[in-house]
Amino acid sequence: MTSSSPNPDTATPPDWTRLQQALAVEADRGFNNLQGKQYRFHEFLSLSLHQIPADVPTGDYDRWQRLAQRFREYPDLSYGDRRHLVAETRQTLPRTRLSYEAPPEPSPTKAVPTAPRTAPLIAPTHHTAIIPHLDLPLSKLNGVGPRSAQNLAKLNLLTVQDLLYYYPRDYIDYARQVNIRDLEEGSTVTVVGSVKRFNCFTSPKNKKLTIFELVLRDRSGEVKLSRFFAGTRYSNRGWQESQKRIYAPGTTVAASGLVKLSTYGPSCKTLQDPELEVLDRSNSPIESLNIGRVLPVYSLTEGVGSDTLRRSVIAALPATQQLTDPLPPSLREQYDLLPLPQAISQIHFPDDGDQLALARCRLVFDEFFYLQLGMLRRRQRQRQEQTQIQLAPTGELLDRFYQLLPFALTQAQQRVIKDILNDLQQPSPMNRLVQGDVGSGKTVVAVVALVAAIQAGYQGALMAPTEVLAEQHYRKLVDWFTLLHLPVELLTGSTKAAKRRTIHNQLATGELPLLVGTHALIQEAVTFNRLGLAVIDEQHRFGVQQRALLQQKGNNPHVLTMTATPIPRTLALTLHGDLEVSQIDELPPGRQAIQTTVLQGRDRPHAYTLIRREVAQGRQVYVVLPLVEESEKLDLKSAIEEQAHLQTKIFPEFTVGLLHGRMTSAEKDRAITAFRDGETAILVSTTVVEVGVDVPNATVMLIEEADRFGLAQLHQLRGRVGRGAAQSYCLLINNKKGDIASQRLKVMEQSQDGFFISEMDMRFRGPGEVLGTRQSGLPDFALASLVNDQDVLYMARQAAEDLMAQDPQLQDWPDLRETLAYRYQRLMGGSILT
Ligand code: ADP
Ligand code: MG
């Protein structure tokens, strides 16, 4: 319990049911912080959570206070963070409610109502002698005891079921035990030896890094192992001393991991980030069982050691008998999946490596499957929504537009246009994402759809994330629309008040058929007369809320979103599995491949020679830097200094412009216009140019500190050149030593294919990084990896599609429906589907 005292005027617990409803509704409506009768969602939540009494039996008071505080900040959170917060609260709430409502001492036994067999939210307390009930609190589980139960609660483990689903994060495989002398690079093995030397100390170079060095010896030889711990918790003297006691010389230790060459010497081998297990410290029965088995390694916390966890899991395992498998048996057979009880047992204490692989496959399948099924059901519901806006795919205006296009559409563009025009005829609103590499010609595809809407007497809106991009779209549209004798206007933050008023008026009367702009489009004052289609460019730069706001400017209008950041198919399925997705996977003809070269800093003069040659031929050049201002820590060049340097020292004979994020939009505008008009030959810029600047005369893209960028971002930047007919160049300056950095950059030399590049980026840096961590919106998988489990993902998607085709309401599978509601909500914080 904590020392903080409960608020005196909140002695009564909150209305649990209302709380749960509020959370469910918020998730259902897309985390828009709904306005209730009295409060907004976040106000209601933080008030209610505050009321949770300090004597909640699980001792969760602190956590609830923390959550209440976070809800106060809810309006400022990103979509992903909102979703996480809501999901976390929805997961935790039933437990607190349960423990609050069920007194900690055994209550007089009543008839026990049958609990839902899968994933119950509220469950009765129950005792059984041998097979523990899934919902049994851990304090009542044989061999766990109240102290351990309290500690386990810190890991959010409160019931037997929680333990069963607390998967190991790794294993020590004693079946793969080898002699130290026989270590072979690339294999995953376990060695058992005695500690010869041990040391644990804070890195002299980095105070936050703790180094842990262990020399193990067996009869055949010795091996030096290292681990690194980041965080002040480990640089703590006490922690380090405790490690020294644990790994005292002579102690028998098992170490498990991937064998690699060590940096200590050419022929030295070591284990990469090894799992360690002290073997002879205790005589616990579990550990004597160990040898010859695959042993689970769990994430631990203060007061919960691996012994406690393993013992508790072993006590809980018989309860797997009560797990029913919600998957239809035919589906399980088709995909060779283990039954759920067996998979859960084997994931904790596998008989051998093969069983472990099968168990893991089944559970990974489940994680993907419920997500895909949930998204497919959401899509199905969207399709059932009605719209009055049905647009004809042909007509005079469209014909005229096609005629005035100065080029022939690519096959890919034609295919995607067909998809879109088909959507627009349906009685339900379109919700389609168009993915296409930089320069693949997405704009014209969107314009065809807009023309179709205008032709039918509706209005269109095109929203872009930056003024630069909005303006560029506007210019192109003015060219085309003037020939069609149609007005189009631009609305951004810098539109003058008088102009803005005119635009607002013309929109409201319906006089203005098409409006292009930035976030300014979703301001309150903007009302459309008959919005038929909303197009959102670079959709990943907008939050869900902003997209929804644009949509709400009409009466169930069609929505087309576009992105130039190709993402691997696994990510697309995981993020947009509920959208219709079209890909423009072909560039307009006549584009030459951009010649890409990775250079070291000392090669910069070569780059300057190339630049000089290109500018002399009348071409233009981008020089891109990662940051605006010099940061001592990162020692990055600032754009301002670089511009001065290039202008005075390197290219005094040319004009060097500057563009960065801290400039006002008028200043940015001037810089871009000057570059577009050829007044500046070289534009030094931060990543502002990443989004859509289109200057066909630019042929060189020089990127400083390229190693600091993700590949997907480099690809975007590179797409700024190669827009005209001339040969273009991309020069990547790599400042990092080391293989990984240069291997990663080499991908850019090898490929111009955005999908391939993003796939590689994901392999090098992980899915979260590819998307940009903050707004990634990826679900938290317990086991599944989007990099390593692609096959299982495709399998799960297929299975979900098949099942939806056969039984869209899941009528024959009530267990599955129930589990889906629970699991999908847990993964996505998304809507409950029942
Ligand atoms: P992005 O997909 O990056 O938004 P844009 O729509 O800006 O690409 O198109 C890039 C350039 O290619 C524009 O100048 C556009 O007019 C031109 N373009 C688009 N489609 C074709 C085509 N089929 N043939 C030739 N040029 C095209
Ligand atoms: Mg574009």
Image (cartoon, rainbow, N blue to C red):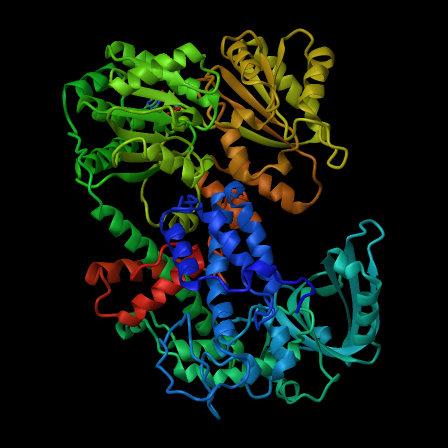
In this view, the residue in front, 388 or 163, is 388
Splitting the image into four quadrants, where does ligand 2 fall?
A: top left
Query: Residue 125 vs residue 281: left or right?
Result: left
Query: 329 or 75, which is in the foreground?
Result: 75
Horizontal arrangement in the rendering, residue 396 relative to residue 794 (left or right): left
* Residue 629 spot, x, y in % from top left: 69, 27
Residue positioned 22% across, 22% down in the render: 454
| Quadrant assignment for the N terminus | bottom right
Q: Which of the 4 image quadrants contains residue 176?
A: bottom right
Check the image and name the residue furthest to the front. 9
Measuring from the top left, give residue 397's x and y in whole percent: 18, 18
In this orientation, does residue 435 appear? no
Q: Is residue 502 visible?
A: yes
Q: In which quarter of the view is residue 329 placed? A: bottom left
**In this orientation, which residue lies closer to the viewer: 697 or 739?**
697
Q: Is residue 814 left or right of residue 338?
A: left
Residue 800: percent from the left, percent from the top?
A: 30, 60
Quadrant of the image for the C terminus? bottom left
Q: Is residue 701 above or below residue 173?
A: above
Total marks in image: 0
**Residue 524 percent across, percent down from the top left:** 39, 27
Residue 526 in the figure: left or right of residue 346? left
Q: From this view, report whether residue 400 is shown above or below residue 215.
A: above
Would you place residue 75 above or below residue 320 in this image? Answer: above
Residue at 83% x, 49% y is: 205
Query: Quick one: 224 or 558, which is closer to the camera?
Result: 558
In the figure, residue 523 lies in which quadrant? top left
Q: Residue furthest bottom?
A: 129
